Image (cartoon, helix red, strand yellow):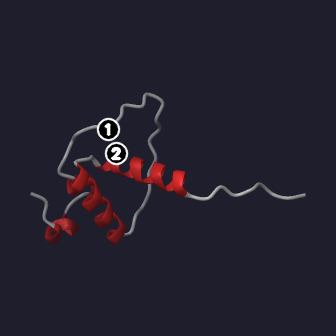
Amino acid sequence: MYYICHMKDMSPSQRFISSNRVSKNKTSQLISVRLPEDLLERLAAAGNAEGFTMSDTIRIVLERGLRAAPKKKGPTQ
């Protein structure tokens, strides 16, 4: 079981209890991002609720957010 009280002692990937992979995109690239502790806790809670790994959770959240974001028009001339 996943316990929030020990989160600060854990690495980001240790906060996720599942290792189930959602997709295997062969064209993906590794990036590095620093996240505030509270955001990392929220991502871990969401990923654990769905049974996703950290990478899959972040990928899904980004995809959903970008899909839901209103499209902005380019610069006007």
Say if 50 sits above or below 25 in the image: below
Residue 8 position, x and y percent, is 22, 68
Residue furthest right in the image: 77
Q: Secondary structure at mark 2?
A: helix
Nearest the viewer among 29 and 24 is 24
Say if 52 sits above or below 8 in the image: above
Numbered-mark total: 2
Residue furthest left in the image: 1
Left or right position of 47 against 28: left
Quarter-of-image position of residue 5: bottom left
Task: Assess disc 1: are there few (<14), some (14-19) or many (≥20) residues with their C-alpha within 10 Å of its C-alpha.
Answer: some
Residue 26 position, x and y percent, is 43, 28
The residue where tag 2 is placed is 56
Mark 2 residue type: Asp
Residue 1 position, x and y percent, is 9, 57
The residue where tag 1 is placed is 22
Quarter-of-image position of residue 7: bottom left
Q: Secondary structure at mark 1?
A: loop
Mark 1 residue type: Val
At 25% from the left and 51% from the top, the residue drawn is 50
Left or right position of 60 against 52: right
Task: Assess disc 2: are there few (<14), some (14-19) or many (≥20) residues with their C-alpha within 10 Å of its C-alpha.
Answer: some
Nearest the viewer among 50 and 11 is 50
Nearest the viewer among 38 and 50 is 50
Q: Are marks 2 and 1 in contact (CB under 8 Å)?
A: yes
Checking the image for residue 14, the label placed there is none
